[in-house]
Image (spheres, rainbow, N blue to C red):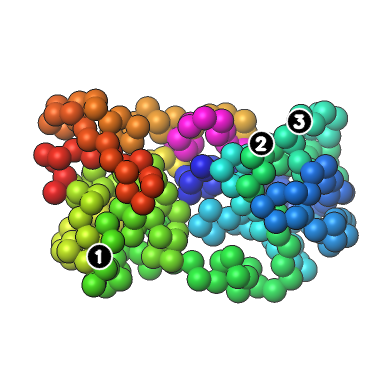
Amino acid sequence: MPELPEVETTRRGIAPYLEGAEVEAFEVREPRLRWPVEAAIAGRIQGQRVERVERRGKYLLVQFAEGTLLIHLGMSGSLRVLMRDTPPGKHDHVDICLKDGHRIRFCDPRRFGAMVWTESPASQHRLLASLGPEPLGSEFDGDYLYRRSRGRRSPIKSWLMDSHVVVGVGNIYANEALFQAGIDPRRAAGRVSRQRMRLLATAVREVLASAIEQGGTTLRDFVGGDGKPGYFSQQLHVYGRGGQPCTRCGEALVGVQLAQRSTVYCRYCQR
């Protein structure tokens, strides 16, 4: 599933083509995504110029003067910048056609992605209103994590992946950040000290920033908005490496399931 770095990589790839561009058409070949794509969207954005392309958590926000198109990539979705005459493939469901001849094409084999229109402020939409702070923003730090975690018995990894706590820290990056911070992913969130929460917040920031710089992580079919794969997978220390040697101590990494998610850690370096 595309996580925050993949979504941010996509935003950076499509923003130069969308911002300031006029929409000529909104073509929907398959409306049956996570929620049906409303036919009325075409009439809302045709002839409008895109003002900004932003990101909130794992949602892309294509902002117009009269509303916002919320886009979620789901489990297998991607957005590509193509020329107008590029024929669609089997899973190419929606095109945002621009007057300059480019089109932003949404491909989603599993159809768990979404395109939702709102004329209210995007921050008030039900999909965004209850989200936690951005992990790369000023509101997120170790003291915030410490305050929110008091009394919580759930494993720190599962708690960190809760979008109401902080947005965009999915399975891959939670594994990596906890390894970097030296915290056992099974430890109860409420039993992690303030000092170690500060280490964790720093690790989350560094891991996500590094992944964005590398263009995300290539897992299965993810590519960025420019059609190029991400390379952060070459720097993974624990995710997907169960049974392999720890990059720090050399001992075999342990793989377990936490909240039905694959979790890998070092029993010696993480406590």
Are there few (<14), some (14-19), or many (20+) residues within 10 Å of tag 1? few
* Nearer the observer, 256 or 61: 256
Say what secondary structure mark 3 lies in: loop
* Nearer the observer, 80 or 148: 148
Q: Position of residue 150 (x, y in %)?
A: 24, 72
Q: Is residue 13 among what the camera can see?
A: no
Residue at numbered disc 2: 109
The reply to whether the magenta stretch includes residue 140 is no
Q: Earlier in the sequence, mark 2 or mark 1?
A: 2
Name the residue at 63% across, 47% down. 112
Residue 153 has which mark?
Answer: 1
* Nearer the observer, 52 or 96: 96
Say what secondary structure mark 2 lies in: loop
- Please name which of the two marks, 1 or 3, marks the residue nearer to the observer: 1
Q: Is residue 247 left or right of residue 96?
A: left
> Which stretch did the figure color magenta?
214-225
Q: Amino acid at mark 1?
A: Arg
The image quarter containing residue 202 is bottom left
Q: Amino acid at mark 3?
A: Lys
Q: Earlier in the sequence, mark 3 or mark 2?
A: 3
Up/down of 67 relative to 239, above or below: below
Residue at numbered disc 3: 90
CA separation in Å, label 3 and label 2: 8 Å
